[in-house]
């Protein structure tokens, strides 16, 4: 369940010229009460809050004067993963936490990805945003056999394989990326679109673009 790099790939597939601007936001300390609630509804509120915080940070860093050529649309978003036993999951802080996520996936092989996208027009301040969800169901038997093989010395285990393949485990919400071949073999079903799981729903992007265009016309 990927982040910024995958969102850029999805935007590249759309007729949208864009420039990537990185602006750090202290995500871990935002929405602490929402994280504690650990419900799908609180996850929806959290990703909306983070998308707004990122938009504020980006707009604050832009030096734009006047309108015309100075008009820009800032696109921001965020994603978390929810799991029935662990609640809201973000990017694992280390491999130990990633391993804890994997253990939970073996026990209850299903997660919901909750993502947001927010379009903010400058200088008008007009906004249009949307929250989208998708479900990923894992092959429980496959994950259990993978762990048995690891413990029995017959395999390395999915997490070790990902690390050795230089997969960005610590940069993905929930610690997994569904497009990776190592992970794909353990996925039973995706409901809601792989693009939504990857961090940006094409349908949501196009809907927000249409709504923002109407507001500006």
Image (cartoon, rainbow, N blue to C red):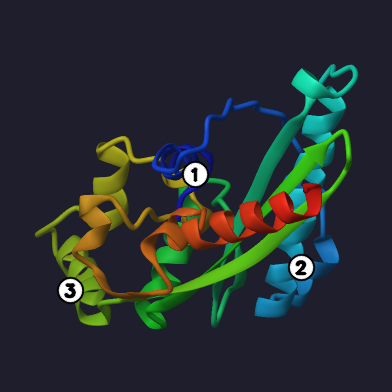
Residue 37: percent from left, percent from top: 77, 76
- Picture disc at residue 45: 2
Secondary structure type for disc 3: helix
Residue 39 in view: no
Distance Cα–Cα, label 2 vs label 3: 37 Å
- Which badge, 1 or 3, comes first in the chain's sequence? 1
Is 101 left or right of 208, judged from the image as shown?
Answer: left
Distance Cα–Cα, label 1 vs label 3: 33 Å
Residue 5: percent from left, percent from top: 47, 37
Residue 79: percent from left, percent from top: 59, 57
Question: Farthest residue toward the front?
Answer: 217
- Which badge, 1 or 2, comes first in the chain's sequence? 1
- Which badge, 2 or 3, comes first in the chain's sequence? 2
- Picture disc at residue 145: 3
> In the figure, residue 43 lies in which quadrant?
bottom right
The residue located at (65%, 78%) in the rendering is: 40
Q: In this figure, what is the number of numbered marks? A: 3
Distance Cα–Cα, label 1 vs label 2: 20 Å
- Picture disc at residue 118: none
The residue located at (63%, 56%) in the rendering is: 210
Which of label 1 and label 3 is nearer to you?
A: 1
The residue located at (71%, 47%) in the rendering is: 119
Figure check: 58 above or below 54: above
Which of label 2 and label 3 is nearer to you?
A: 2
Residue to which mark 1 is pinned: 7
**Disc 2 packing (10 Å; few <14; some 14–19; many ≥20):** some
């Amino acid at each position: 369940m990927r982040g910024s790099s995958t969102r850029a790939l999805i935007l590249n597939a759309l007729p949208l010229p864009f420039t990537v601007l990185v602006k750090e936001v202290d995500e871990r300390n935002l929405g602490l009460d929402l994280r504690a609630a650990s419900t799908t509804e609180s996850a929806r509120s959290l990703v909306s809050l983070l998308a707004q915080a990122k938009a504020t940070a980006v707009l604050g860093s832009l030096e734009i004067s006047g309108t015309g050529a100075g008009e820009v649309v800032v696109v921001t978003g965020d994603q978390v993963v929810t799991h029935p036993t662990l609640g809201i999951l973000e990017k694992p802080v280390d491999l130990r936490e990633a391993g804890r996520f994997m253990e939970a996936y073996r026990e209850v092989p299903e997660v919901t990805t909750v993502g947001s996208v927010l379009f903010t027009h400058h200088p008008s301040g007009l906004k249009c945003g949307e929250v989208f969800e998708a479900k990923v169901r894992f092959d429980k038997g496959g994950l259990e056999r993978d762990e048995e093989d690891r413990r029995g010395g017959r395999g390395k285990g999915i997490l070790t394989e990902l690390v050795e393949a230089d997969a960005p485990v610590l940069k993905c919400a929930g610690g997994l990326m569904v497009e990776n071949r190592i992970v794909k073999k353990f996925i039973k079903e995706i409901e809601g679109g792989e693009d939504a799981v990857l961090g940006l729903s094409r349908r949501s992007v196009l809907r927000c673009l249409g709504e923002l265009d109407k507001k500006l016309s």
